[in-house]
Amino acid sequence: MNTFAKPGKRRLCIALLAALALPAMAQQADDKQPADSKVRTLDRLTVTGSRIQRTDMEAALPITVIQRAEIDAQGITSAEQLLQQLNVASSGPDNLAANSGVAPPGTRGNNGVSGANLRGQGADATLVLLNGRRVAAHGLAGQVVDLNSIPFAAIERVEVLRDGASAVYGTDAIGGVINFITRRNYQGYTLSAGADVTQQGGGEIYHASLLGGWGDLDTDHWNVWAALNVKRNNILRGNQRDFANSFQADRGLSPDTRGTPFANVVSGTGSLIGSGLRDPDSNLTKTTISVLDLPGGAGCEAGGDMMGPYDDKVWSSPGASFGCAWDYGRARTIQQPVDTVQGIGRATFRISDNHEFFAEFMGSKVSSTRRFEAQQISSSVNASATQLDAYELNATTQATYDAIYNQLHDYFGDQANLAYGKPITYRWRCYACGPRQLETTTKAYRLLFGLNGVVGRWDYDIGLSRAESRAQTALAGGYYYTPQLKAALKSGLLNPFLMPGQEQSQAAYDALAAADASGLLLYKGVSTTTTLDASFSGGLGFKLWGEEEVKAAVGFDLRREEYEFNGPSDWSRGNAFVFGAPGDASNYMSPKTRNVKALFTELNLPVMDSLEVNLAVRHDRYDGFGGTTNPKYSFKWQPIDWLVFRGAYSTGFKVPDFAKLFRGITETQYTGLDLADPATCPNGRYNPDVANCNVQIRPDIVTGGNPNLKPEEAKQRSLGFVIAPNANFNLSVDWWEIERINTIRSGFNLSTMTANYPLYAANFIRDSSGAIVQIDQRYINTGGTLTSGIELDANLRGELAGGAWNIHLNGNYLDTFKTKSFDSLPYSDNLVGEYERYFNLPIKWKHTLGFGWQKGDWSHLLTQVHRGGYKDWQPPGIANGYVPANYSRDVDSYTLYNYSVSWAGIDNMKLTFGIRNLLDTDPPFTLRYLDDGDGAGWEARVADPRGRSFNLLAEYRF
C-alpha cells in the first residue's frame, strides 16, 4: 500500500483505492512483493490522467489499477488477455481471434496486432503508454499500438484511466488511457515459467521470463534491472472446435460462399450455361449449379470436407438453389500462432537527494502467421491478364467436361444456353493449392533518457525518447504467380471437378510448385516517434478556503512522427502478378513526417477541505492541420468522510493517421455477382427474374486516402460517486458520455449504400450512358457517434475460517450507442443490444464478479465473467420474411467461470494453478462470424474459442 500524507484520511484513501478496482486479494498478495512494488518518484506519485504529482491517489477521475499479484492470480500472460477481462474494454475486433479473414489492399488486417479499445471508441482512439510516455504505433497499421510489444513480464501495475485525456496527453486519448508501469527499484532475480493448455487441444500458450536487478536507490544511489520474456501462442483452427459449424440451416446459418472443393458451375457470358439455365420444375433461372446437388445427384456432402447445400432461402438467392457451399469459417484459423520475445531494462542513478537520471530501453520481436482457407478461384471466358481461365474442352479435360455436361443436360434438357463445347465457368476452392498464409515479423523498440527530481517546491520530469515499430509481411504458402496458375488451369492440368479420394495429377502438383510465390515480400512499414517532453508541478504558495495548497503543472511536448510504407513494385500489377494476394502497391508511401508542438497546464484548486477542482488545458499544433485547444474540468466533492462525488467535462481530438491521409487511390473491381443498379432496383440486389434487377453490374470500388481530412473531435462528460461507510465495503458508480463528431469514415457498407441510395447517390459514379462504373468509398470527415454508459465497482470484505475474503464486482452498463453517417442526418435509433458487423459489438451489460479467500500461504480466486446477449444479424432471406424452423434472433449471454489457487509455502517460490472456463462453456450461437465470415456460428468479439484450459505458473526468486 502507498503511504498517504494525512493519517486522518487513511481510511477513505484505502477505500477509494479498492473502489478503483484494486481487490483486497491483490492488495494482500502484493504485501509480499519486494520493496520496489511501492512505486515512488521521490516519494510522490504521478497518477495517469494528471501531471501533478501527489502523495496519494485520490483523484476526481475514475482510474482502475491492476496490480501484478492480481494479474498472476488470474493466469493472465499478456496485455491482450488483461484487456479481455476489463469491462470498460469494448467487444471489438482487436484480438488475435478476431479479424481472421484476408484483408483487402489498404487495410492489411491485424497481422498479429492486439489493440486496446476503451469505451467503444476504437483501438486508434485509446492511448497506450509505457511508464507514462508514448510508444510507436505498429509499423503496418500506423495507427494502433500493438500490445504484444509491451514487455509484460516487467509490469508492476496497470493504470486504466476511464475518461478522455486529450487535455493532458493530446491525440488518441478519446476513449481513455492505459498506462503500463514497470518496476523501478528491483534487486535480486526472479525466474518464472508457465503454460496454459486447452483440454480440447490447440491454442496452447507457453511463456517464460527472467528478471534481474542490482543496486538499491536508497543505499547505493543506483539501480539497474533488466527483464526478458519469451512467449508462444499455438495455432487454433476452426475445425478443432465443434461450435465452429456453419451448416445449421434450421437455425438460419449457412455459409455464403460458392467456392467449393468440387466446383460449382456458374453463369458467364460465352460459357457453357451462358446467363443461366431454366429449372424445368420451378421455371426459375439457375445461375449457380453443382451437379452434385441436382435431383438424383450424390449430394453436396459427397463433394468434399465441410461441404453442404447452399441455402438460397437464407441468402435470398433463388438462382443458387442447386449450388453447394463450403464452411470456410470452420476452415479458418481462430487463434493466430504468435511467437514473442520481449526485453526491457532500466538504469536509475540518484545524483543527489533530489535528482535522478534514468535510461530505459524496451525492445520486442513478434512473429505471427495468419492462416486462411485455400484460394477460391473464379474463372472467366476470354480471361484478362488478371483473371483465371474457364475450364476448356480439350483432350486432357474431355472426360470430366463430358461428365459435367451430361449431368446438366439430363436434368435441364435441351436449352439454348446449354451449349456443348463452350468453356465451363466455375467457382472452386483449390484444396491442392493449400491454405493461404501471411507471415508478419515486427520489431519494435523505445529508447528513453530522463531526468526527474525536485527544485525548491517544484517537481520536474524531463524525457527524450525515440520509439520505432518496423514490420513486414511475406507470403508463406497458398499463393501462386498468376501467369503460371493461369496456364495450369487453361490447359486443364488442374481439375476443379474431383471427388474426394481423387487426386490431382503429378503434373498438376508440379505446375503448382513451379508457380509457388512463398517467401515473396508483400509489404513493409515503419512507424517512428521522437519526443522531447517536460513537465513541472508544485505548490503555488497559497491556499483558498481549505487547508491544502493550490498546485499547478505546466509542460510541453515536442514530437516528430514518421511513417513509411512500401514493398515490391510488382504488386502494382495486382492479380496479374500473384493471384489473390493482398498486395498494396497503390498505397505505398514515401517517408512522411509531421511535427507536433504542444503546451499544457493543469491547476488543482482545493477550494475547501471538502471540494477540489482541477482545470487542465492543452494546445497542440500539427503540421498540416493547425492548432487545436482542448480543456478539461473536473471536481471532487467530499461532503462527509465516507462519501465522494466526482465529475468531469472535456473535449478531445484525434488526428488522422498517415495512411488515411496519404494512402493511394485503389480501384478494385467488385467481385460479387449480386449487385444491380440501386437507382432502379430496390436494395441493389441482382435477381435475373425481377424486372429492373436483372442486369448485373460489377463496378470498380474506389478506396484510398484523403489529404484534406481534418481531426476528429469529441466531447466527454462523466459524473459519479464513491461511498465507503466502513473499511469492509465500498462502492463507486460513474456515468459517462462521449460524442464524436467530424469522424473519419471510409468503406461504407455497400449494402447500406445501396439500401439508402438517395443519401449515397454522389458516391455512385456513372459514365456518359448512365451506367455505374465506380463506387467511391474513400475516407471523409462526416457524421458522428454518441455513446454513454454507467460503470460500477464494488468491494465487500471480511474474515472467514481464519482467513480474509473479498467479493469484488466490476460492471459496465452501456446505455446509448447511436451513429449517423452524415452531419445532416439525425442520430440513429439506439443500437445497444443490436448486432454491429464491423466494429464494436454494443453489449448492454458486462461484468466480472470475483470471490477471493486467503489464509496463510494459500489464496483462492473464483471469478465469473459475464457478457450479455444481443439481437443477432439477419441474413437477407430472413430479413425478407423467411423463418427457419429453429430460428431465433436472440443471441444468448456468455458466462465463464475461472478458478485459481496460489501457494507460497516454499521460501522464495510461488506456484499458481488455474482453470479458465471452468465449465467448458461454448460460445453462444450466432449467425455471423466477424470479418465477412458469414457462418461459423460464434462471435470472436465476445467469446474465447479456446474452451476449458489449465494453466500453471511457477515463480522463483533468488
Image (spheres, rainbow, N blue to C red):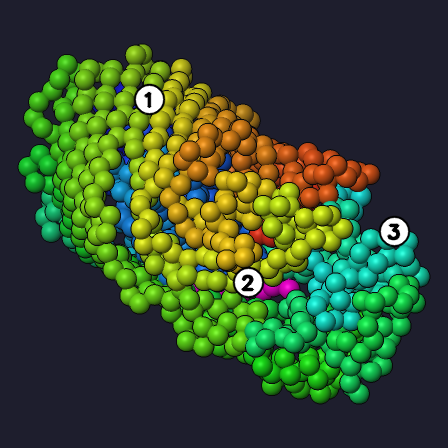
Q: Which residues are magenta?
A: 365-374
Between the residue at mark 2 and the residue at mark 3, the CA separation in whole angstroms equals: 33 Å
* Image quarter in which the C terminus is found: bottom left
Which numbered mark, 1 or 2, is in the foreground of this view? Answer: 2
User: Where is residue 63 shown, x and y percent of the image?
Assistant: 36, 33
Marks 3 and 1, how far apart at CA:
68 Å
Give above or below for 800 relative to 287. Answer: above
Q: Using the image as rendered, state which of residue 738 and residue 785 is in the foreground.
A: 785
The numbered dot on residue 646 is 1
Which amino acid lies under the numbered mark 2 shown in the image of this protein? Gln
Picture quarter containing residue 263?
bottom right
Task: Name the residue type under label 1.
Answer: Arg
Q: Which residue is mark 2?
A: 669
Q: Position of residue 344 (x, y in %)?
A: 33, 59
Image quadrant holding the N terminus, namely: top left
Majority secondary structure of the magenta segment?
strand
Q: Secondary structure at mark 1?
A: strand
> Which residue is disc 3 drawn over?
282
Which is nearer the eye, 822 or 428?
822
